[in-house]
Amino acid sequence: MDIGELIRDLREGRGWSQAKLATEINRQYGTTLTREYVSRWERGKVEPRGFYLAALSRVLDVPLAVLEGEVDRRTFLTDVAGASIAPVVASDLLSAGFAARLSGGPSADDWEAKLATYGTEYMSMGAADIQRRVSRELVIVQQQLEEPRLWSVAARLMTLYAKTFPGSDGTKAVHWYRMAAKSADESGDADARVWVRGRAAIALGYEGASLPIADVLADQALAVTDRPSLGLLNAVYGKAHAAALRGDRATALALDERGRRMFDTAGSYEQTSDYAVPWWRLNVFRSLLLARLGDERGAAEAQEQATAELPPSLPRFATHLELHRGLMLARSGDRAGAVAYAEAAMSALPPEKHSLTLRMLVNEIKA
C-alpha cells in the first residue's frame, strides 16, 4: 500500500482535484507545487518527504504518522510478529505459520466458523486477549491465501485485529483497516469489501479518531454498492459521527435519517456478535451521535431504547451508554460532574471488560 494511493483517497474524499490540493498547499505554505507533481506522488513516481509530508498532514487533516506508516500488505506477517509481542510469542506465531503451511491449514468453512466465534467473543473479551489470539490466526491464514475466499477471511480478521489498537495512535489501526480493505478487494467478494470498510468507518468515527480515513473508507463502501447491508449501515454511521465531530450538524442528521431507513432493511436479529447490528446497537450508535450534536432529548430516547433491549451479558455496552450521558453533562457545562460520572461508570465495570474505545470516550468527556 503506497503513500500515493493514500494521498489520492484523502484528496478524493474531500472532493478536491489534484490542482486544488496543490493550491491549498501553496496557499498555506507559500510554495509553488504543481498539479503535475501531485499526480507524480499519486502514481508512485516520487514520494513526498519531510516538508511536503508535514504539509500534506496539515492540509488533509491526517496525522503525520499515518502518512509515514503505510507499508505494503506483503509485510503484514512481520508486522504481526513484531507488534509489541514478546520474542517467545513471536516464535510461537512463526511456528504456527509454518505448521499451517505444512498441513494445509483449516478449510474455508472452518475459518468461517472461527470468525463467527470471534464475532461473539469480541463483544465481551478485552482487547489484549483478542489481539493475542487474532494475531496467531493472521499468521496461519497468510499461508493459505491462494484461495480468493480466504482473502475475505483475512480481511475480516484484520478488521478485528485493527480494532484492538486505538484509532488515535495514528498508525497501527489505520494501517490494518486499509490493509483489510485491500485484502477484501483481492477476494472479489463485494459483501466483504463493503463490510470491512464500513466496520472500520464506524470504529474510527465512534472513537473520534482519524476522521478523514473514516470518511474515505465509508465513501469507498458506498461506492461499491448501494444495496442495504450491515456493512453499508456501519459506513453511514461512521460518516455521521465524523460529520458531527466536525460540527456539520445538517450532514450528521441527514446520515442518521438515512441509516435509520437502511436499518429497516438491513438490521440483524443476532444480538451478541460484532458482525451484527440489532436494534439496541443501532441506538448505541445514535446515542453517542446525538449526544455529540447536543440533542439531549434524542440522545436520551436512544439510550432508553438501547437499554431496553441490551443483553445483560454485555455490560461493556451499558457502560458506553453511561459515558454518553457523561458527554451530555459535559456539553451542558457541568464538566466536573461529567468527569466524575464517567469515572464512576468505568469503576463499576470490571477492569477486564474495559476497552480502548471506552477509554477514548472518557478522554473525549475530559477534553
Image: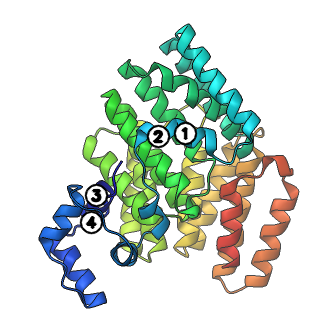
Circle 1 packing at 10 Å, graded few (<14), some (14-19), many (20+), is few
Residue position marked by numbered label 2 in the rendering: 75
Given this view, does label 4 or label 2 mark the residue nearer the observer?
2
Q: If you read the primary sequence from the N terminus, does the residue marked by circle 4 or circle 2 appear first? A: 4
Please tell me whether residue 96 is drawn above or below residue 347 in the rendered image.
above
Q: Mark 1 and 2 residues: CB-CB less than 8 Å, in contact? A: yes
Q: If you read the primary sequence from the N terminus, does the residue marked by circle 3 or circle 1 appear first? A: 3
Q: CA distance from mark 1 to mark 4?
A: 30 Å
- The location of residue 141, given as percent across then percent down, is 52, 24
Residue most extreme to the bottom = 30
Q: Nearer the viewer, residue 135 or 321?
A: 135
Circle 4 packing at 10 Å, graded few (<14), some (14-19), many (20+), is many
Residue position marked by numbered label 4 in the rendering: 11
Residue position marked by numbered label 3 in the rendering: 4
Query: Which element is circle 4 on?
Result: helix
Residue 246's image quarter?
bottom left
Please tell me whether residue 87 is drawn above or below residue 12 in the rendered image.
above
Residue position marked by numbered label 1 in the rendering: 78
Q: Is residue 228 left or right of residue 45?
A: right
Say if residue 242 shows up in the picture.
Answer: yes
Query: Which element is circle 1 on?
Result: helix
Residue located at (63% from left, 64% from top) = 300
Query: Which element is circle 2 on?
Result: helix
Q: If you read the primary sequence from the N terminus, does the residue marked by circle 1 or circle 4 appear first? A: 4
Given this view, does label 1 or label 4 mark the residue nearer the observer?
1
Question: Which amino acid lies under the numbered mark 3 shown in the image of this protein?
Answer: Gly
Q: CA distance from mark 4 to mark 2?
A: 26 Å
